[in-house]
Amino acid sequence: MNYTEKILAFLDRQELIRTADLTELGIPRIYLSRMVAKGQLIKISRGLYRKADSVLDEYYIFQLRYQATIYSYLSALYLHQLIDVIPKYLEVTVYSGYNANAFSDKVRVHYIKKDLHKLGQICVVTSFGNEVLTYDKERTICDLISNRSKLDVEIFSTALKRYMSSNSKNLTKLYRYAIKMGIEKKVREILEVLI
């Protein structure tokens, strides 16, 4: 098996290949450039490539590039299937002080104190079968309630109703997060209406 075949075989098992993967496989990096020139690969960003005919998992690729991001708000609702609408943009949360200037205009960024950044962080599987970091349902609901005035009323209502009817909801965890985030009163008021 030649180097090109090894790279293609690797990409049959995984969606992406990094230059670091080539080092592990003992393949010279020049083969990536050659395969891009021949139209076999597409360079996504520095050191990151995919097959030319593969379908792109935007959530997975973005997080590979920017590992400090956690999917939140509409993106988290979509990943948890609490809304049916596919968001027009990626929505992520980073800690205060993080430099998000490299993000495209298709990304909405939310900033939070560093000590709350990983609160409720979990891994979920995208529709393409890749794992990404997002906030759990309870943290996502807290974020929504905290920023209710900035959200579409229908999306807010749908997400809350689906969460409340879910068998996997954890109201104890929701209240614990609300206390840590300083929004306990807002959460209690909204949940009293729904319950």
Image (cartoon, grey):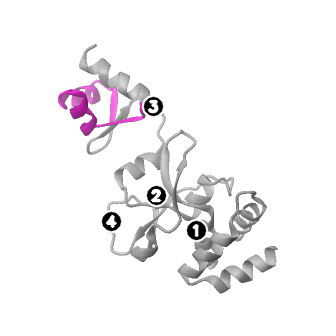
Mark 3 or mark 2, which has the lower sequence index? 3
Q: Position of residue 130 (x, y in %)?
A: 49, 42
- Residue drawn at 63 percent across, 70 percent down: 173
Does the CB distance between marks 3 and 2 fall below 8 Å?
no
Residue 147 visible in the current orientation: no
How many angstroms separate mark 1 from mark 3 (CA)?
33 Å
Residue 62 in magenta stretch: no
* Circle on res. 101: 4
Which residue in the protein does label 3 denote?
Answer: 54
* Disc nearest the viewer among 4 and 1: 1
How many angstroms separate mark 4 from mark 1 (CA)?
25 Å
- Residue drawn at 78 percent across, 79 percent down: 192
Mark 2 or mark 1, which has the lower sequence index? 2
Q: Secondary structure at mark 1?
A: helix
- Residue drawn at 57 percent across, 65 percent down: 73
Q: Quadrant of residue 179?
A: bottom right
Residue 67 visible in the current orientation: yes
Q: Secondary structure at mark 3?
A: loop
Quadrant (top left, top right, bottom left, bottom right) of the C terminus: bottom right
Q: Quadrant of residue 6?
A: top left
Where is 32 relative to 4, above or below?
below
Where is 51 relative to 20, above or below?
above
Amino acid beneath label 1: Arg
Q: Nearer the viewer, residue 96 or 137?
A: 137
* Disc nearest the viewer among 3 and 2: 3
In the image: residue 57, left or right of residue 97: right
Does the CB distance between marks 4 and 3 fall below 8 Å?
no
Amino acid beneath label 2: Lys
Mark 2 or mark 4, which has the lower sequence index? 4
The magenta stretch is: 14-42
